[in-house]
Amino acid sequence: MHEIGIANAIIEAGQAETARHAGSKLLRIGVRIGTLAGVDNDALRFAFAALTQGTQLDGVGFEIQSCPRRNLCLGCGHEFESALYSEPCPRCASEQIILAGGEELDLAYVELEEA
Amino acid sequence: MTLIPIEKKVLSENQRIALSLRERFKEHGTLCLNLISSPGSGKTTLLEQTLGGFSPQEKVAVLTGDLQTENDARRLARYGFPVQQITTGGVCHLDGKMIERALERWSLDEIDLLFIENVGNLVCPSSYDLGEEGKIVLLSVTEGEDKPLKYPSIFAKAELLILTKVDLLPYVPFNIEQARANARLVHPGMEILELSCTTGEGMDAWSAWLAHRRETMLQRICIARA
């Protein structure tokens, strides 16, 4: 729902990183988005394209790495991927499960053409 | 061509502001609570009832967010405590900068308890840290009991779930036990209160929760300073 704001923050961060490498040109930005981050990847791609179109960043690549939900078992410490909250631990069958990942909203990398 | 790893939060600027807000709240001993729910779950009504129960000497304030209108601020201002409306103009959540800007008009010395009523939305507000001490999520019995499963992020992050409008339970097919179970599936051990602003049921437990929460925060600050 707030993909425009997220895309804008991504673009600003990408520009800031590029500015630290004098004379370089931004080619691609990579982000990691968790399935629970509340971000729709298609809407984010659309927002990124819309915000860069007709600017100096027109044509800059944008890669989204999706991160699955990961659960942590409080019973045995096992961490596992799962689409559900209700899935018991596959190792010890405990139902005391907490969230260990899947909320990522991270910048992963920028790819630059150096001067 | 060079690939430069960054490993930074996309919302790191918001995070920076939130951390500075949290520090300020701690310094002043202000308990800040961020209320989040769907539109129409009863955030404003709960705040009205809550403010109505405080004596005028209490240092309580409210920031209330909406896309448009000053309606909520008008409703809440009747109780004599400082209230500010934050109209986001279309943005679906409050962010740290909006809180920082609103607080420029107030002195935190004069606020022991600050409620932030977020924009009605179960999705985006869960991503934005406002520097609060805790998040509270409201779910009314006129909604579905599976909301914790549909919108897990906020239910996982909120420390307290308030089930509102329980006076309507005889008239709606809401299964309250299932709602509680769903919330605890997403967030084991989550605290849950049930209340009705119409009948006043559960309001005492809510007041007690607030008083206790304030105490635990002050104790923690004292220990940290000692």
Image (spheres, rainbow, N blue to C red):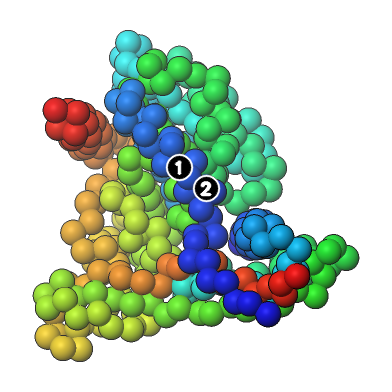
Q: Is residue B194 left or right of residue B83?
A: left
- Dot 1 amino acid type: Ala
Name the element at disc 2: helix
Pick the residue in front: B183 or B124.
Answer: B124
Quadrant of the drawing holding the C terminus of chain B: top left
Q: Is residue B147 visible?
A: no
| Residue of label 2 | B14
Which residue is tagged 1?
B18
Residue sitting farthest toward the front: A115
Q: Are marks 1 and 2 in contact (CB under 8 Å)?
A: yes
Residue at 51% from the left image edge and 26% from the top image edge: B103
Q: Chain of mark 2?
A: B
- Among all residues in the image, which is located at the extreme bottom? A90
Q: Quadrant of residue B28?
A: top left
Vertical side of B106 occupied by B128: above or below: below
Q: Residue at x 48, y 45 (%)?
A: B16
What secondary structure is marked by label 1? helix
| Chain ID at mark 1 | B
Q: Is residue B144 left or right of residue A33?
A: left
Residue A82 is marked as none
Q: How packed is label 1: few (under 14 Cα within 10 Å), some, or many (20 or more)?
A: many
**In this picture, residue B130 sits left or right of residue A60:** left
Going by the numbered disc 2, the residue's amino acid type is Asn
Q: Nearer the viewer, residue B133 or B141?
A: B133
Residue at 53%, 32% in the rendered image? B100
Residue B30 quadrant? top left
| Discs 1 and 2 share one subunit | yes
Q: Quadrant of residue B190?
A: bottom left
